[in-house]
Image (cartoon, coloured by chain):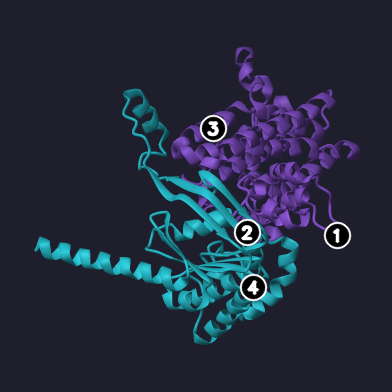
Chain colours: A cyan, B purple
Amino acid sequence: MIELTGVTLVRRLPDADDYDLKSRLLNALTGRRRPPSRRTVLDKVDLRIAAGEKVGIIGANGAGKSTLLKVICGVLQPTAGSVRVAGRVAPVLELGAGFDPELSVAENVIFYGVLLGFTRRDMLERCDDILAFAELEDYRHAPVRVLSTGMTARLGFAVATDVEPDVLLLDEILSVGDERFRAKSQRRIMRMWDAEATALLVSHDLAFIRTSCTRALWIDRGQIRANGAPEDTVEAYLEWVDANAEQAIAKVRAGS
Amino acid sequence: MASWDEVAAEVITPEKNTAAKNVKEVEARIGPYRLPPGGRDLRTAAVRRFADVVVVLTRRGTHKRYRGSPLGVIWSLANPVAMTFVYVAIFGRTFLPYFGSLQAYGYYVFIGLSTLGFATASTAQALSSVVANGGLLNKVRLPAAAIPLSSVLTVAAQLGFGTLPVLVAIGVLSGTSASRLLLLPIPLFGLVLLATGVAYVISAAYVFFRDITHPFDLAMYFLWVASPVFYPIAIVPQRAHWVVAYNPLYLYLDCVRRIALGEPGELVRPLALTLAEGVVACVVGAIVFEALRPRFLDRV
C-alpha cells in the first residue's frame, strides 16, 4: 500500500556563486544577497495505491515523474505532506548509477546491492546468481570500466531485480541489453509484474501502459492532471500533446 | 489494528536513518514494540544498515587508496619513513643534545610524521567526501553520515595495519615493555574519533562553501607547524608555549610517544583525555552533520 498525502517537494536551484564563502560574505555585507531560486517539483500530490495495483505514470520530460518515484522510495524527503509505503521496495531507477568503474564486477555487485538497501550478507550469498543472470561470470574479477554500456546495464538490472519486492518502482526500464537479453530481462520484469507486487512504472511506452497497467497517472508540472483507467488517461494526455503541438505550430505561423 | 509485522517495512522504508524515531511513532499508534519470533529487530536493522554502508564505502575507499592489496598499506609507509630519513639527515645533528642519539630522534620524528599525517590525510580525504558522493545521495537512500566516517576509516586502515606495527617495533627496539605497548591502540583510537568528529563538521561545511579548502589548508599547515613533529618541545620559547598547549593534536602525539618510547610520567589521565576528547568531538560533529543533512540534497 502506498499513500501520499499533500506531498509537496520544493527543490532549491543552485546559483553559480552560491558555494563561495567569500562572495556570500561580500554579498551579505553589501546587501546584494539574492534569495535562491526555488522550484516546486511536486505540488500537493495526493495518491493512494492499493496493494497489487499496476500504475503507469506518463507526462512530459521534467514533469516530476521520476521525482515522484524517488519520494516514494525515500531518496527525497517531501517538503510538506506525508509518504507511507508498506512493504519491501525495489527501486529500479537509473541502473548502475552506483557502480564504481575501478572496482571489480563482483565487488560492484555487493557495493551496488548494499546501496540499494540489501544487507551485505545477502549480497555475498547472491552474488553468484546475479552474475549468472547478467551472464558476466567471466568478468567477475575485471573492473567495471572494461564492460560495455550494454553489459553494465545488464549488471545493474540483475542486481536491482534479484528480489521479490512488495513494491516495484520502474523508471523507463522494462528491459535492457541486446535482443536476446532483452527477452530475458522482460520475462523477469513480467514475472514480478504478474506477482502480487504493487508496481509503479514511468514510461513513454503508452501502448504498454494501455495494455498492462490497471491505472495510469498523468503528471504535469508536479501535479496529477489525470488519474484513472489507462485508456482515459492516455487519451487525455495525447489530446493535450496534440493541442500543444497545434498551438506551437500556430505560433510559428503567426510569427513568420 | 495493524500488527508490527505489517508495519515493519513501513517503519524502515521511508527513512531508515530515522528508524528509531519512526519506531516510537508507530509504538504510539499500535502499542509497544516486541521482537516477533524469528523476526528482525527494527532498531538493529537500522544499525546494521549503517554498518553495511560504512563497510562497503570503506572497502571501496581502501581499494582505491591502496590499490586493493595489503601491500598497498605497507607501501603507504614509504612516505613517513623516507621523510624521517630526510629530517634525521638535516636536523639530526642539531637536535642531538635533546635526544641522545640519531636513532632516538628518528623514532621521535617517525611517530610525529605518521600520527600527524593521519590527522591531516583523513580530514583532507573527508572534506569533499559528501559532495563527491552527492550523485549517490540523490539516487539511492543512504545514511549520509556513513560517508565521512568511511573516508576517515579508509585512512585509518593505514594507521592500524601500517603504522601501528611499526610503532610496536619502535617500542620493542626502544626496550619498552610489552604490557605498555598494549596501550598504543588507545590514543590512536581516540585520534580516529577526533578525526571523525572534525570530518563530520568540515564535510558538511564543504557542501555549503566549496572555498573552505583554502582556510582548511591554512589551518592544517598551522597545526603542522604548531605540533612538535620534528623539533623537541624544549626549543619552544616559554611565551609561545600556548601555541602547542592549545593544539589538540599535541596530546595525541605526546601520548603515543610516551607509550612507544617508554618515557616516564603519568599515563592514565592523558589517555583518558584522548578518548574523552575523541568522543566529544565525534558526538558534536555528528550532531552538526545531522542538523545540516536535510539541506544537503539540493546542494550536492
Q: Amino acid at mark 2?
A: Leu
Q: Residues within 10 Å of mark 3 (few under 14, many from 20)?
A: few
Q: Amino acid at mark 3?
A: Tyr
The answer to whether marks 2 and 3 sit on the same chain is: no
Say left or right for B29 vs A242.
right
Q: CA distance from mark 3 to mark 1?
A: 54 Å
Residue B7: percent from left, percent from top: 72, 54
In this view, which residue lies farthest toward the top? B239
Query: Where B244 falls versus A161 (above or below)?
Result: above
Residue tagged 4 = A141
Helix, strand or loop under label 1: loop
The residue depicted at 66 percent of the width and 50 percent of the height is B16
The residue depicted at 55 percent of the width and 37 percent of the height is B292
Question: Which one is closest to the eye, mark 4 or mark 2?
Answer: 2
Helix, strand or loop under label 4: loop
- Pointers 4 and 3 in contact (CB under 8 A)? no
Residue tagged 2 = A115
**Residue A52 shows up from this direction:** yes
Corner quadrant of residue A131: bottom right
Of marks 4 and 2, which one's residue comes earlier in the chain?
Answer: 2
Indicate the chain on which mark 2 is placed.
Answer: A
Residue tagged 1 = B38
Q: Amino acid at mark 4?
A: His
Q: Residues within 10 Å of mark 4 (few under 14, many from 20)?
A: few
Corner quadrant of residue A161: bottom right
Indicate the chain on which mark 1 is placed.
Answer: B
Residue tagged 3 = B221
Q: CA distance from mark 2 to mark 3?
A: 36 Å
The residue depicted at 89 percent of the width and 40 percent of the height is B178
